[in-house]
Amino acid sequence: MAGGWARDGAVNEQIEASINDELARLKAQKTPVGESLTHCAECDEEIPEARRQAVPGVKLCIDCMQDRDGAFKARGGINRRGSKDSQLK
């Protein structure tokens, strides 16, 4: 059921389009660009040939990549304007 003059399913189509756009942006961000390095950019260890062929444009060895992925901590998205605490102050 759509609201106003929109046809049925229009809201869901907009949501799906937004999700697909964001997924495409994230995929483009994670795709390495350029030629693979033979040695890790951080620790200078040799990157195995199998990894260089599997991940074109790879710059880090597996250990450094795991350390970098593990170091990222997503923070919670808190909307301070919409929270009850901010309205009480």
Image (spheres, rainbow, N blue to C red):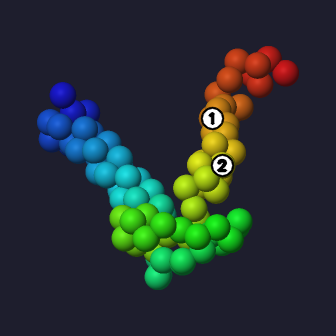
**Crowding near pointer 2: few (<14 within 10 Å), some, many (20+)?**
few
Q: Amino acid at mark 2?
A: Asp
In which quadrant of the rendered view does residue 15 lie?
top left
Image point (69%, 45%), residue name:
71
- On screen, residue 32 versus residue 59, left or right, reads left
For marks 2 and 1 on the same chain, the one whose residue lies earlier in the sequence: 2
Location of the N terminus by quadrant is: top left
Residue 81, given in percent of the width and then of the height, sits at: 69, 32
The tag on residue 67 is 2
Residue lying at the far left of the rendered structure = 8
Q: Secondary structure at mark 1?
A: loop
Q: Are marks 2 and 1 in contact (CB under 8 Å)?
A: no
Query: Visible in this render: residue 73?
Result: yes
Q: Secondary structure at mark 2?
A: helix
Q: Amino acid at mark 1?
A: Gly
Q: Image height check: is 60 above or below 66?
A: below
Q: Nearer the viewer, residue 84 or 35?
A: 35
- On screen, residue 27 versus residue 60, left or right, reads left
Image point (70%, 67%), residue name:
42
Q: Nearer the viewer, residue 17 or 2?
A: 17
Location of the C terminus by quadrant is: top right
Residue 56, given in percent of the width and then of the height, sits at: 40, 72
**Which residue is the site of mark 1?**
77
Q: CA distance from mark 2 to mark 1?
A: 24 Å
